[in-house]
Image (cartoon, rainbow, N blue to C red):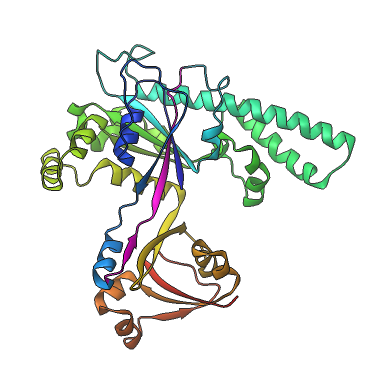
Amino acid sequence: MKIGLLGFSKVGKTTLFNILTGAHVAVEKYASGKAEPNVGVAKVPEPRLDRLSTMFKPKKTTHAHVDFLDIVGLQKGEAKSIDLKEMRNVDAIAHVVRAFRDDSIPHSEGSIDPRRDIGTMETELILADLDVAQRRLERLELNIKKAKNKDDELELPVVRRCLEALERETPIRELDLSDDDLKKIRGFAFLTARPMLLIVNLDEADVRTMAGFVEGFGLQSFAARRQMALCAISAKVEEEIASLDAADARAFLDDLGLHEQAKDRLIRAAFGLLGLIQFFTVGEDECRAWPVRRGATAPRAAGAIHSDFEKGFIRAEVVSYDDLVATGSIAAAREKARLRSEGKTYVVQDGDVINFRFNV
């Protein structure tokens, strides 16, 4: 899974990137940023995998991970004119929105207004997609006039529908497109077709009232939108927490009334936005978490491990995480009939521990 961090200048985006990935990219308050994107990896926190690792004592424990991409901060009016190709290859876009106050870091629009900035960024992305859709529509119409092609004729109404939505200032993610429709436009990687995670970067003084940030900044309409999720952090506070040892960090979080660090909350929010769950494989060599789309069948989940597993799928031996922990071992789960044999139609559940049988 790859998430692209997007935002206007001086919103705390690179600071957040460092917090999420453990990187140490220099953050200059008044620099316009560098052209090359920053790329980093964050481990997905998973207490269930940690518990399984304690049980099986494997040689290696492998958590799922998220790749984060951090590009230079945008200026208003730039999205259509600059190359956002890196952002067109991500699974979701995380728009970091400034809500912190700091007179030494002036906002390009003057006042601090998250609602305004979210709307402005949405307009920027719509304009960028509008340009792509218009050019594609022109090319399709020209191709069809020259030589009728079935694929082009099927794609044309989908692109036209996207263009009409963009002209109405509606993001493509809000259209009710079928899986087939999405496949037809996948090659153009429309920015507004990507799920959007809005990350509101709060002032340190607002952390204790973080739970009410949606109402506090008037963001209810965004919270209700399709394929959009909201999350609040204070990058300044999280940067300080990240520099502490585990005990001091826990004490600091407790003092602020926070149950967990922002990194964990953001990754979980991204998983939910993308409809991801995790299943586990266990053994003496490795215990590992595997993310798959909610609703994935057993063969599709097997394919997440290796394509041969999916091609030669025979059956899946499944036990839920809770049952495995309660019984204490795979052998005990089998004896107590908690280990099930499932076929090709089985829909994998979050927390399933699976051993796949296959033959290629």
**Is residue 14 toward the left or the right of residue 137 in the image?**
left
* Residue 232, placed above or below residue 128: below
Q: Residue at x 42, y 72 (%)?
A: 354
Q: Residue at x 75, y 39 (%)?
A: 156
Locate residue 242: give its quadrant.
Answer: top left
**Is residue 79 toward the left or the right of residue 214 in the image?**
right
- Residue 110: x %, y % from top left: 34, 11
Seen as rendered, the residue at the extreme front is: 59
* Residue 296, placed above or below residue 275: below
- Quadrant housing the C terminus: bottom right
- Residue 42: x %, y % from top left: 35, 46
Q: Residue at x 29, y 15 (%)?
A: 105
Seen as rendered, the residue at the extreme bottom is: 335
Q: How many marks?
A: 0
Locate residue 311: give its quadrant.
Answer: bottom right
Seen as rendered, the residue at the extreme right is: 146
Verify whether residue 66 appears in magenta: yes
- Residue 24: x %, y % from top left: 30, 33
* Residue 310, placed above or below residue 213: below
Seen from the viewer's position, the closer of residues 24 and 356 is 24
Verify whether residue 93 appears in magenta: no
Seen from the viewer's position, the closer of residues 30 and 144 is 30
Region rendered in magenta:
57-75
Q: Residue at x 23, y 36 (%)?
A: 238
